[in-house]
Structures are given as structure tokens and as C-alpha cells.
Image (cartoon, grey):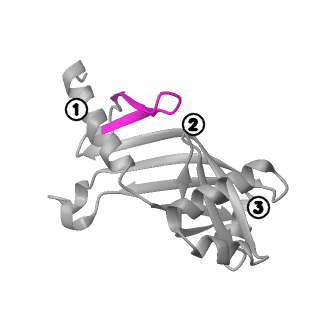
Amino acid sequence: MSTAAELQKLNTQYHELYNSFKTLLLATTQDGIPEMSYAPFVRDAEGVFYIYISELAQHTANLIANPQASVLFIQDEAQSANLFARARISLSCTAREIAKTDPLYNQQLLTMHTSFGEIIQLLSGLNDFHMFALQPIQGRYVAGFGRAYHIDIRKNCLTDNIRGA
């Protein structure tokens, strides 16, 4: 069992890692074949990730066919004292395509434009780009060897250590 002080320190480390990324690693599948890639994202106040991806990317077809994904944020190799124990956050997500007619589409496109600049205006003029909302449903933060924690998705904080992880 972690003490309250230890858990508070770990929560700080978790949030620092969680908030340090502008891209996410994305794992999707279709017909049992896994695909790993990455995508820039924006995140709303509820913790939903929005990605804007092309039909040329395999994960677009995968998300349309199978609206489940895993998202990974992992500590940079250069910052890790041990490459076998890099700090990381993994999230299981459900995916939902946001229709271009949905008001949320334009809202998130504007947020992306603010975050990523003029490239969003260029991409939004292309017909093959799709916006997806990735809603985390469960997660895990690994702080090192034997230091894995469940993430309370609703509160965006860690719960106690996962035994045996």
C-alpha cells in the first residue's frame, strides 16, 4: 500500500508526464491485425482526446471498423535511468468519429488550429481527413519496476498500486 504522501508525489509525476505531450502513440486493430502509429491531439476538460487523421493512415480504417484503441504516453529514452522501466501511461479508449456536421467538429478544429497552426486549415480542406474522439475508459501509470497504478479516469488521478504488475 502506498502512503498518502507517496501517492500525492506519484500523482504529480503522472500529471507532469500526461501534460507533456502533443502527440499520442495509437494502437488500433482490424481483423485481428494490430497497427501502431501516432497522431497529434487536443484534449478537452473531460479528458477526451481529439485526433484528425487521414484515410491514407491505416488506423483511420481500423477505428471506423473497430472503435477501440489504446493510447500510450512514454517517457523519453534520454530521460530514463533504465530503459526497462520507462515511466508510461497507457489508456484503453473507445473511439467515435465526429461528423463534419456536428458542432463539436468545428469547435475541436478551432482548438487544433490554436494548438497546431495553419496546417489545420490546409488539412481541413482535404476530404480524406476524419476527426475522432478517443474517450479513455481505463488506464494504468507505470512509474518503474513494481510501481504500476490504476488511473481513476473520472478524477484523472492514480489509485493504489496494481499488485503483480
Q: Earlier in the sequence, mark 1 or mark 2?
A: 1
Image x and y of residue 87, in percent: 28, 51
- What distance separates the C-alpha of mark 3 from that of mark 1? 39 Å
Residue tagged 1: 9
Nearer to us: label 3 or label 1:
1
Compared with residue 36, is residue 48 higher up or lower down, i.e. above or below?
A: above
The mark that comes first in sequence, 2 or 3, is: 2
Check disc 3 and report the residue beneath it.
64
| Dot 3 amino acid type | Ile
In this view, the residue in front, 147 or 58, is 58
Give the side of residue 71 with respect to residue 75, left or right.
Answer: right
Residue at numbered disc 2: 46
Q: Overall secondary structure of the magenta stretch?
A: strand
Q: Which region is colored magenta? A: 148-160
In which quarter of the view is residue 141 placed? top left
Q: Residue at left 66%, top 72%?
A: 121
Q: Residue at x 76, y 61 (%)?
A: 64
Q: If the image is split into quadrants, where does the N terminus sit?
A: top left
Left or right of 89 on screen, residue 36: right
Q: Using the numbered discs, state the Cα–Cα distance from disc 1 to disc 2 in whole angstroms.
A: 23 Å
Circle 1 sits in a helix, a strand or a loop, which is it? helix
152 within the magenta span: yes
The answer to which of 43 and 121 lies nearer the viewer is 121
Query: Of the residues under marks 3 and 1, which one precedes in the sequence?
Result: 1
Residue 3 visible, this angle: no
